[in-house]
Image (cartoon, rainbow, N blue to C red):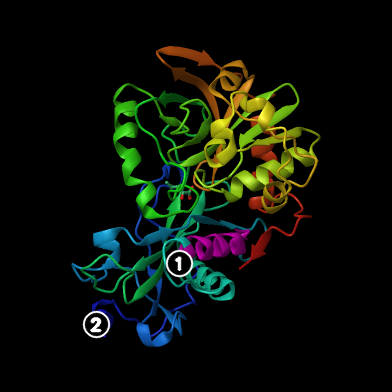
Amino acid sequence: RRWQSSLPQLDHVDRSDEESGGEIDWDNLGFGLTPTDYMYVMRSSPEDLGAFPRGELCRYGNIELSPSSGVLNYAQGLFEGMKAYRRPGRAGYTLFRPEENARRMQHGAERMCMPAPSVDQFVSAVKETVVANRRWVPPQGKGALYLRPLLMGSGPILGLAPAPEYTFLIYAAPVGNYFKEGLAPINLVVDDEFHRAMPGGTGGVKTIANYAPVLKAQMNAKSKGFTDVLYLDAVHKRYLEEVSSCNVFVVKGGVVATPATRGTILPGITRKSVVELARDRGYKVTASLNLSLVPFVHRAHNFQQQLTVPYRTTLISSGLAEQVEERLVSIDDLIDADEVFCTGTAVVVAPVSTVTYQGRRHEFRTGPDTVAQELYTTLTSIQMGLAEDNKGWTVAV
Ligand code: COI
């Protein structure tokens, strides 16, 4: 096993030092990469028959990959994003719904023909990575330790086929706000040339292959002063999908709407949590179906009428239960909305002040008395351990 020699090995992980990352400017963290001390690595070889027999912490550093590895040649890879917060007034750290990330990775692995760690293996590995890098967890209120689990076809393959060997790896970095705007509202542009995903593709799983294709659109947008890009569905070029790195919500009156996850949209864990919190707080939450994945809709002239057919399974599986009203979130709905905001692990809940579509700039409400602000506070209070978690979402480390 040649790869083993390439990993920076540890004799043991010293868990005794509780000093913090001294040289870090905790007030200006942003979302840049600050290398930390340890990473977790686990491999699955052909003789392991799809299991990951054991993993270990090793020094954070470069890994050796075959030039013909499945991930380098055919993008056979997935990633996750998670955060650990320092617990206020108590020792230890808090993770947010880590088993959801584990399950999402398993689901993505099935799509990408890869074996995946069990939920227990995944969550234990995340905990070990947090503990080993604990001096890099930012002080309360300054940010979080971002965990980046990766799963990749690391074995060599030349003809197009699943790789013979897989590597699961978790590294960590302290992070603050994702967008350069910090917590200030962001400005999006709708790109009508590029799309993020198409029906039958991999938009609904967190494969690495979904991210490089948006760079071009993102760079174009940034060069014109926008924060990021909002993508429309690839079939009708009319219905909201998501932003490059996060899900999108629109608010009109007491109704909060987000496109449903039907294969082209990433099923965000923050998205799902925000839907539940919004409902708890008395908002009517609607999740639209992703039109492009509903085959009969392609034949229909009146999409809205067709979509009154109830999609019980969709709604139950996405955790939205039966009271959820189904409708599409079109670009016209967005233009008519009071508020727009984005959700994601990195992004948390980010208010959107403007969306530019076909050269016209549309403005939305932002600030202290908005639904976005209310949901941001409610969510982050739970995540940071400032409010009681009566949903059982947080996991102590
Ligand atoms: C996250 O929010 O954790 C993500 O994975 C998005 C990534 C592009 C930063």
**Few, some or many residues within 10 Å of mark 2 (<14, 14–19, 20+):** few
Q: Amino acid at mark 1?
A: Asn
Dot 2 or dot 1, earlier in sequence: 2
Residue 363 in the figure: left or right of residue 226 = right
Give the magenta range: 95-110
Q: SS class of the residue under badge 2? A: helix
Q: Residue at x 63, y 20 (%)?
A: 337
Location of residue 149 by image quarter: bottom left
Q: SS class of the residue under badge 1? A: loop
Residue linked to disc 1: 133
Q: Amino acid at mark 2?
A: Ser
Residue 319 in the figure: left or right of residue 161 = right
**x and y percent of residue 388 in the render?**
77, 53
- The disc label shown at residue 5, or none: 2
Query: Is-magenta flag for residue 108?
Result: yes
Q: Are marks 2 and 1 in contact (CB under 8 Å)?
A: no
Q: Residue at x 61, y 44 (%)?
A: 271
